[in-house]
Amino acid sequence: MTETLNPLSPTSVRRSPMRYLTLVFLMTSMFLISCRANDPDKSSPNVPQVIGNVKLYTFSSDAQYFLSNAQPFILPPKTSLRDALDSLGRHLSKTYFSRTYNNALTDIHFEVLGIDRLSNPSRPFLTAIVNMVDVNNDALGYFFQGSTGGQTTFCMITATFMQPQLDPPLLDGLVILYNGKLLPKLDHINLTGLLIPRLVEPVAKRAILSTERKAVNPYHGLKNEGCYIGGHVLQG
């Protein structure tokens, strides 16, 4: 007879330490969401002071591959993590989110509500809560609409803030709030709860590699690896 284990039972935890670590990570992060929403602009005192020598990228949208034209986003090594996230958020506001597809200006911008460091034997995990401020609900009316548009927006936000091509990534976890609240259920993507880098890592790396190869050979093409959203690979 096959034994079925309760994933939260002591027996299951002993057999799968990574399951226990994942549960602790998720439960702690969700607790922090409620705390930050009620007490914004606070960060853990143990968050690293500077980002160091890391190669950050920004992206352009792509109708087929979601992300393309990866460009280095240069910040001084002594830039704090909060300032780096603020800068990346401002870039998103001024580029991808600056206008709707009918060319109407938006007032979408991002606020870093908090950054936390979760202890782990190998290395600490860094998580952030970012509030997407959109008083006119332009994102719901335009950027999150449609299958390709919604997936592109998902990849744009998560890849920009988490920088999943790095090892370790800039952020190990990201929570996106929308006007101070969890995003409502959307048809094509799920931005509710804790987002992790591997959800968008293949798309970000493909965009970076494609841009580098096109700089050498403008006619070079790459196969779409898809974007992992909600446990599924979404092809362009």
Image (spheres, rainbow, N blue to C red):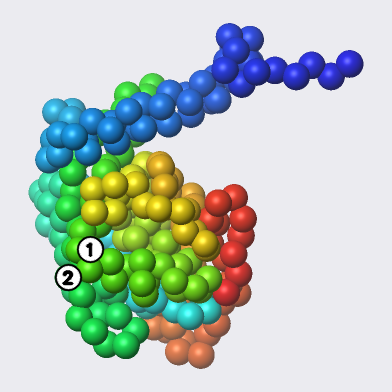
For label 2, count other residues whose C-alpha is less than 10 Å away and answer few (under 14), some (14-19) or many (20+).
Answer: some
Which residue ends up furthest to the bottom in the rendered image?
Answer: 219
- Quadrant holding the N terminus: top right
Q: Residue 216 lies in what quarter of the image?
A: bottom left
Camera sees residue 138 = yes
Q: Nearer the viewer, residue 93 or 207?
A: 93
Asked if disc 2 and disc 1 are in contact, CB closer than 8 Å, the reply is yes
Residue at 22% over, 68% down: 136
Q: Label 2: which residue?
A: 107
Name the foreground residue: 22 vs 177: 177
Number of the label disc, if any, that sits on residue 171:
none
Residue occupying image coordinates x 36% and y 72%: 141
In this rendering, position of residue 213 left or right of residue 109: right
Residue that carries the numbered disc 1 in the rendered image: 134
Task: Say if residue 58 shows up in the picture.
Answer: no
Q: Position of residue 125 (x, y in %)?
A: 34, 34
Q: Position of residue 39 (x, y in %)?
A: 15, 34
Q: Please, what is the three-letter code of the amino acid marked with disc 2?
A: Asp
At horizontal 41% and vertical 27% (from top left) the residue drawn is 27
Question: Who comes first in sequence, dot 2 or dot 1?
Answer: 2
* Element marked by disc 1: loop
Percent coordinates x, y for residue 61 in the rendering: 39, 76
